Image (spheres, rainbow, N blue to C red):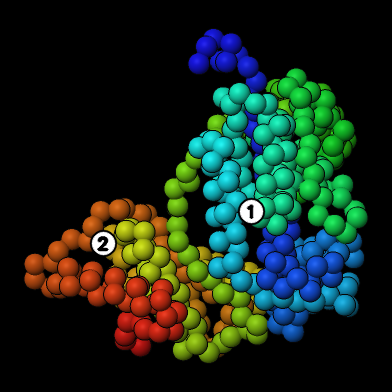
Amino acid sequence: MNQSDLTKPRQIIHLDLDAFYCAVEEQRDPSLRGLPFAVGGHPEGRGVVSSCSYAARVRGVRSAMPTARAVRLCPELKIVSSHFDLYREASRKVMRRVRAITPLVEQISVDEAFIDVSGLPEDAETIGRRLQAEIRDELGLPNSLGIASNKLVAKTANDVSKAAAKSGQPPNALTVVPPGKEAEFLAPLPVEMLWGVGPKTAEKLAQMEVQTVGQLAAIPDFQLAKRFGKIGWSLARRARGIDKRAIVTEREAKSISKEMTFAKDVSDGEILRERLRRQAERVTKRLRRHGLTARTVKIKLRWPDFTTLTRQSTLGEPTADEQVIAQAALKLFEQVWARGRAVRLIGMGVSGFTNIPLQLGLWDRDWEKERRLQEAITHLQERFGDEALGRGLMKE
C-alpha cells in the first residue's frame, strides 16, 4: 500500500436483502409471488410479522406488527410459517459471494452486511452493481446497496432508497454518496433517520426545534454536549456524516438465550418450569456445539401488563451441564414467581463464556463420560430433532 492509498476515502458497501424471508418463501412456493403475504405467527394468537412482501407493505403492513393488526389492515393477507433452515442456507450462499470479493465483511444479521472494498482496484459502484446482479439473478434474491465512505452514511443511503420504494415490488436500489458529500446528503433527512436518534432523543431535539439532520449539524458541539452529555459529541459527528468505525469481521457472542411468548397467558407452574427446562436443554446444546462453558444464568419473565423482569445468578464455576444450568434457572424462577401468577413470556439464557474444556472430576462425577454422553445427545438431536432425546431432569 502506497502513501496515496492511506489518504484515499474508504469505500464501504452496505448490503441489505430486500424482504429476505419473503424472497426465500417465494422460491419455496412460487404461487406467493405478487401476493400480499407475511411470514410470522398466526393472528388468533399473539403472532408478530417477521417479514412481509412489498405487496403487503403498500397496504400498511410492516415487520414487527402484531399479525392480528396486519390482517385488519389487509384482510386478504396470507400468513406463512417461517422456515429458518431455508433462510440460513440462503444467507450462507449470499455471504459466500460477498466474502469471495474481500474478507473485510461485517455481517450484521442473516440478511445484512457491511463490505469494505477500499483496497480493491475497481471502484465501489462497479463492484456493487456486479454483486447486486449476481445475488438477484443467480441466487434469486432481490437486494439493495448503499455506498459511501463510512458505515453510517452507507446504511443511511440504503435506508433512504429502500424507504422510497412505493411500487409494491422489491426496490433493488443502489445509492452512492460521493466522498465529501456526506453532510450534504444527510442534511435534508428527518433527524429520526440518523443512527442513534431514538424516540426520546428525537423528542428532546424537537423541543429545540430541530427537525432535520442539517439543523442538528448546525448546532455547536459544546451545546449538544451540554444538552445530551457524552452522546452530544457523537450526535454532532454523525450529523456531519463523520464515522470512523472499522469493519468488524467477527462478532463474539456475549450470550445464548431462548425465550417464548405464549399464545395465552400461562399461570400453571409446571408448564412454566417445563418450558424453562426445555430452554435450558436447547441453550446447553448450543454451548456444547460451540465448545463453550458459561458462568452466568439469567431468566426473563413478562407479565400480562408487559412489565418485564430479569434475574441472574453466577455459578461457582463455568459449565455446559444441562442439569446445573436448568436448576439455576428454576431457582431464580421460584424466587420471583408467585403461585398462580400469569406469565406472558418466559425465557432463560447464559453468558460469561469460556472455551476451556470441562475439567475432569476426581471424586464426584466422571466428566469425560459426561462429555461423551452430551455430545451423543447433541448428535442425535441434530439428526432426528430436538424431541428425539433429552436428559432426565428431576422435577420439583
* Label 1 environment density (alpha carbons within 10 Å; few <14, some 14–19, many ≥20): many
Residue at figure coordinates x 40%, y 57% from the top left: 351
Disc 1 and disc 2: Cα gap in Å? 39 Å
Q: Earlier in the sequence, mark 1 or mark 2?
A: 1
- Residue 111's disc number: 1
Residue 33 seen in the figure: yes
Q: Could you say where residue 162 lies in the image, as x and y percent from the top left?
A: 80, 47
Residue at figure coordinates x 89%, y 72% from the top left: 73
Q: Could you say where residue 297 lies in the image, as x and y percent from the top left?
A: 39, 64
- Foreground disc of the pair 1, 2: 1
Q: Quadrant of residue 86?
A: bottom right
- Residue 316's disc number: 2
Which amino acid type is marked by label 1? Asp
Give above or below for 241 relative to 142.
above
Q: Nearer the viewer, residue 44 or 14?
A: 14
Q: Nearer the viewer, residue 395 or 157?
A: 157
Decide if residue 190 is on the left or right side of residue 94. Answer: right
